[in-house]
Image: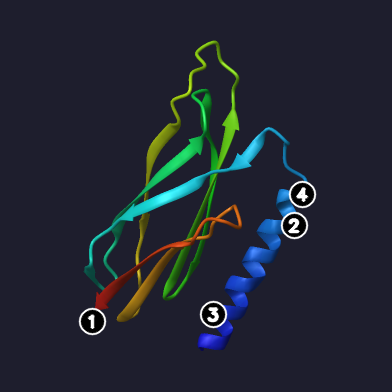
Amino acid sequence: MRRVSRTLVLAAFLVMAGCSLFRDRHVNPAVVCSFHAPDTVRAGTTFEVTAHVGLGAVSGFVVDHKEIVRAHTYLSLRVWSRDIGGSIRNDQPTEVDITFQTRPTRPGPYRLVAPSPYADWHEVEKIITVLP
């Protein structure tokens, strides 16, 4: 079963990478800095995960869209930002909190991950314990 889950997650990442080739060049991957989620939840219970996201190096960036890949014991989040080029431009980075809901169905470890859009950044990860 793990092999099937890993294959599905890999296929989803390849589809997302392929689709990103046809996106607007003003849309860029954002950096997920951290997750805020409970340490333990019960199987079948919906809970919220809040991701703290850096959208851009200067103000004027907004969330364009988010992509979520779910599997039984895995959740991957990727956020995309767009530079709207507004009149307010300063050196303050644009940071937001994005909340989404998920519901693990099986007991055991549940892995939340945000792949880094840049090679020099590390992957943000949190393991949640799912109780029966």
The correct choice, above or below, for 20 with respect to 92 in the image is below
Q: How is the image coloured?
A: rainbow
Spatial separation of the CA atoms under disc 2 and disc 4: 6 Å
Name the residue that disc number 4 marks. Answer: 21
- Say which residue appears at 45% left-offset and 31% top-offset: 94
* Badge 4 amino acid: Leu
Instruction: State which quarter of the image contains the C terminus.
Output: bottom left
Name the residue that disc number 3 marks. Answer: 5
Q: Position of residue 68 (x, y in %)?
A: 51, 56
In primary-sequence order, the first of circles 2 and 3 is: 3
* Badge 3 amino acid: Ser
Mark 2 and 3 residues: CB-CB less than 8 Å, in contact? Answer: no
* Badge 2 amino acid: Gly
Spatial separation of the CA atoms under disc 3 and disc 1: 20 Å
Mark 2 and 4 residues: CB-CB less than 8 Å, in contact? Answer: yes
Name the residue that disc number 1 marks. Answer: 132
- Say which residue appears at 39% left-offset and 36% top-offset: 96
In primary-sequence order, the first of circles 3 and 4 is: 3
Spatial separation of the CA atoms under disc 3 and disc 4: 25 Å
Which circle, 4 or 1, is nearer the viewer?
4
Name the residue that disc number 2 marks. Answer: 18
> In which image quadrant can residue 131 be found?
bottom left
Along the line of sight, the residue nearer the viewer: 50 or 122: 122
Q: Position of residue 95 (x, y in %)?
A: 41, 35
Which labelled disc corresponds to residue 90?
none
Spatial separation of the CA atoms under disc 2 and disc 1: 37 Å
